[in-house]
Amino acid sequence: FVWSLLKDAMPHLQAESPYSSSPLAWRLFGLLPDSQAQQASPIVAAYLREGDARRRMALAGKLADVFDQYLVFRSDWIAAWEAGHLLDLGPDEAWQATLWREVRASIDADYSSAEVPHRADMFVRLFQQWQSSGPSRLPERITVFGVAGMPPAYIDVLGALSEHIDVNLFL
């Protein structure tokens, strides 16, 4: 349902984003050997120096999953990193922020003729569009049952929708 709201607001969205876990893992695999993140983390540098391509791919896959979770649950971190700021999150933040900025620059370079937002960007744009023209093609009501955990962006979407239709949330 949320994807359909995003597609209504941004019809140009691609079916698969380069920010999805699988394509992101391959991009990270290519970026890691020359990444400045190695300078920010001797542990990452040593891990990559001592390993082979399989080990690098395993790390790239784990990092892709972590970044995917940040896009959903910690979009404020991503926004700060893209703006060049650190949030004092601990010793691993600097190299992760550096690597994220490299990922973003790489994707932007590859898709220079087309706008390719990641999930956190999509929600910002969705709310901007709704502020100017409101959501379109909505059902009469939405009912959500038994959700153990919900990303903040989804809660914000439900809150914004509740200004236009009935939203029932049963936990």
Image (cartoon, rainbow, N blue to C red):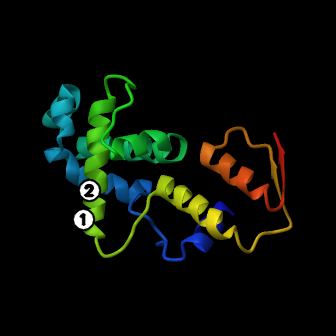
| Residue sitting nearer the eye, 7 or 30 | 7
Number of numbered callouts drawn: 2
Could you say which disc has been placed on residue 146 in the image? none
Judged from the image, the secondary structure of the residue bearing numbered disc 2 is helix
> Can residue 151 be seen?
no
Q: Between marks 2 and 1, how big is the CA–CA gap?
A: 6 Å
118 with respect to 139 (left or right): left
Q: Crowdedness of circle 2 by 10 Å Cα count: few (<14), some, many (20+)?
A: few
Pointer 2 residue: 105
Residue 171 is at least partly visible in this image:
yes
* Tag shown at residue 109: 1
In the displayed structure, 54 sits above or below 112; it is above
- Residue at 50%, 56% in the rendered image: 119
Q: Quadrant of residue 108?
A: bottom left
Q: Camera-side residue: 35 or 48? A: 35
Disc 2 marks a residue whose amino acid type is Ala
Q: Position of residue 50 (x, y in %)?
A: 14, 33
Q: What residue is drawn where x is 46% and y is 72%?
A: 14
Measuring from the top left, give residue 2's x and y in whole percent. Answer: 65, 61
Marks 2 and 1 in Cβ contact (< 8 Å): yes
What is the secondary structure assignment of the residue under circle 1? Answer: helix
> Is 123 left, or right, of 30 in this rendering?
right
In the drawing, does residue 97 fall left or right of residue 129?
A: left
* Residue 62 in which image quadrant: top left
Identify which residue is drawn at 28% across, 71% down: 112
**Residue at x-position 32% and y-position 28%:** 92
In this rendered view, identify the residue nearer to me: 5 or 79: 79
On-image quarter of the C terminus: top right
Type of amino acid at the residue the image marks with label 1: Ala
Give x and y (percent) for residue 135: 70, 68
- Packing grade of label 1 (10 A; few <14, some 14-19, many >=20) is few
In the picture, which quadrant includes the N terminus? bottom right
